[in-house]
């Protein structure tokens, strides 16, 4: 994800007011992101007075940023349907609108996840061949990080959805991790073909029989994620969300027990003090900020959700992923594969009334 | 789980030949279990010659054990339906048969999970009011361990199943952890009522409106498991299996990174050496052997599955749980609650042909 003077120029729209620590970490994060990425411009939406004051402190941001004022913002407890219908001039909506109108190549928000997905779905629609967008995330493993999707946009998924997620995850892994032929695993409760629910079994058949150049590894189990067995983990949004959060909870419990143990005696504390540099490296390796950024894949435009409580480093990572997705035109990859696969169902129009089934995904903010 | 001279006398049937390290760890595990539990007798099924030689090394086992010879055993790669139809004299089947015939109060096997569930379902049938048995497990948390079910017996679950699992988990928590009013959480992708799939939402309503003395906490998310928010975690077998294994995989990854860090420099190694007692305590706290034993709940008889690759300590834990479930008559608790709840559907007969839908659960052995 390093900079390149000759890389494509991209403009990223930032929701200046979304998230617990906005607008400060938005501007600071943008500044950090610029250190690793060239040829980037920003449009930041929000309270212009506050934002202008902030960007004065980060000249590298100030020099490449256009501020667009709005008083309105989406609140954390807005229902997605409410945010969609009533927050017409919210900083979040304006950022997505900039993507739709071609003024920006991607948008980042640390605000309300459900609202962001709802507004994105309605304003951007899905790519040809993609029935439903998914939320993808970068997950640490013993080896290189993998991408996992869906992390919660779709509670119920059929085989077509899982197939589409596989194509999106494949494109993501190629673009962000420069994998030439990323391996794809379907999350299941066993590795044999006969296991799992109907959707998983049918999706496995579709992937095996597909003419696409997909490297389908087969079924994987929960513990294979951390082993780094595959580059792309595909699952429905219910299972994916539970798996992601269970992993987070386990990591927290582990840290808690470790801290307890190292504080349990003076000699242990001395040992921990001696090992502190290494323990810090260990901690850094699993720092959630490094994995921040939930990508909304399958939309006719790039939208990335930052964790609501993230710090500037985390926001910078979300911005960095957005820049790379835009520079490498991930959606062209996805559409090409969908056309090749012949798997292009009639495009559905999303009506406002369909939004009753949009899941409120604020829970990703915990 | 400590012994009590005046406790009920129970007989536990052991599959002497099931698991990677049988029969050695079966006998050694039985010996370890006897150190914490009084008034226990064993019937061990398997190769009598080998077993006789083994129990001579553990006089405490020899004194309370009846050996029953059989040449036959279920193999790890037997399909459940095959094991059920063809392994009529297997050590596994004979152990379950002893429970059915009232010769034993519970059975333990470290063999093929799918076969064990299939044979148990057919030979023992489910308790009145219970449509499907579930697999329960004891899970470490920051606080006290919790019980989680289903861990993989039922890929698709409806609200009735989840309600039944709640009753079974409640009874388990009362019996094994002496919780007076265990809190029950439904695993979901958000804590609001509107979230989740139809089964989870309907089950939440049933639990809220139930006349039973159930302490329904509400929806929980994956990271709440490790926080120890509730005493009982209820979910379908697909999600539960993925969550359990993802937690295991995360713990392994965490240990791997920690080991790496503490070996990364001489000074870190010195620190680790100083802290070794505390680090060992930390490791012990998460030792999988302490959590060994997957309980088949909802059957008309007590069956516990030990991890196939466990050591003697792990097998002893599985035996210990079985003893406590038997001494405290968990099934009486479950049936009483089901009768009180008025939630007793017509009892279905399980026919051999139904077994095509029995999931092969060997994956719990990893």
Image (cartoon, coloured by chain):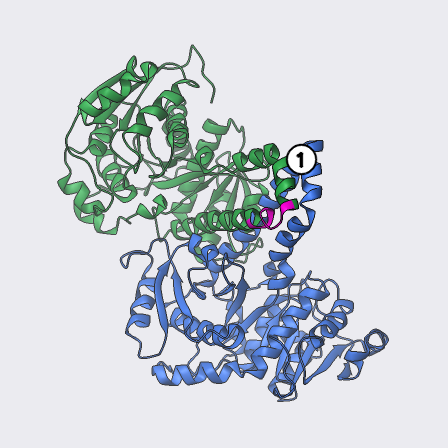
Chain colours: A green, B blue
Parent chain of label 1: B
Q: Residue at x 31, y 72 (%)?
A: B206
Magenta stretch holds residue A254: no
Residue at coordinates 74% horizontally, 79% vertically from top-left?
B44
Classify B213 as above or below A241: below
Q: Quadrant of residue B16?
A: bottom right
For the point 53% across and 58% down, which residue is it? Answer: A195
Closer to the camera in the image, B141 or A41: B141
Q: Quadrant of residue A172?
A: top left
Question: Mark 1: few, some, or many residues within 10 Å (few <14, many ≥20)?
Answer: many
A220 left or right of A241 in image = right
Quarter containing the C terminus of chain B: bottom right
Rendering coords of residue B305 (x, y %): 61, 69
Left or right for B264, reference B225? right
What residue range appears in magenta? A260-266
Q: Which residue of the protein is positioned furthest toward the front in this rendering?
A: A266
Image location (x, y in percent) of residue B103: 66, 88
The image shows residue A288 at horizontal and vertical percentages of 45, 38
Q: Quadrant of the N terminus of chain B?
A: bottom right
């Amino acid at each position: 994800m390093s900079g390149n003077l000759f890389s494509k120029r991209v403009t990223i729209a930032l929701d200046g007011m979304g998230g617990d620590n906005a607008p400060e970490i938005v501007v600071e994060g943008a500044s950090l992101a610029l250190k690793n990425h060239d040829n980037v411009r920003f449009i930041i939406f929000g309270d212009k007075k506050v934002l202008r004051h902030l960007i004065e402190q980060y000249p590298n941001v100030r020099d490449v940023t256009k501020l667009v004022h709005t008083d309105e913002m989406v609140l954390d407890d807005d229902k997605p349907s409410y945010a969609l219908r009533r927050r017409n001039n919210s900083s979040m909506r304006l950022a997505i609108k900039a993507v739709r109108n071609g003024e920006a190549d991607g948008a980042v928000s640390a605000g309300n996840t459900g609202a962001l997905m709802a507004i994105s779905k309605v304003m951007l629609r899905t790519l040809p061949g993609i029935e439903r967008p998914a939320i993808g995330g970068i997950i640490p493993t013993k080896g290189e990080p993998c991408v996992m999707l869906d992390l919660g946009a779709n509670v119920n998924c059929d085989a077509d959805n899982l197939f589409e997620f596989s194509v999106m995850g494949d494109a993501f892994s190629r673009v962000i991790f420069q994998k030439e032929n990323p391996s794809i695993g379907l999350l299941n409760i066993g590795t044999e073909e006969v296991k799992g629910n109907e959707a998983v079994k049918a999706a496995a058949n579709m992937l095996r029989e597909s003419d696409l150049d997909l490297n389908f590894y087969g079924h994987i189990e929960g513990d294979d994620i951390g082993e780094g067995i595959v580059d792309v983990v595909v699952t429905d949004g219910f299972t994916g969300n539970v798996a992601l959060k269970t992993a987070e909870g386990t990591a927290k419990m582990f840290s808690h027990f470790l801290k307890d143990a190292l504080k349990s005696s003076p000699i242990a504390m001395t040992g921990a003090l001696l090992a502190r540099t290494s323990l810090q490296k260990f901690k850094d390796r699993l720092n959630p900020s490094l994995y921040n950024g939930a990508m909304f894949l399958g939309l006719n435009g790039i939208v990335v959700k930052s964790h609501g409580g993230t710090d500037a480093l985390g926001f910078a990572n979300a911005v960095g992923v957005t820049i790379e997705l835009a520079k490498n035109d991930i959606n062209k990859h996805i559409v090409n594969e969908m056309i090749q696969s012949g798997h292009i169902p009639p495009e559905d129009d999303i009506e406002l009334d369909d939004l009753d089934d949009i899941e409120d995904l604020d829970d990703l903010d915990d």
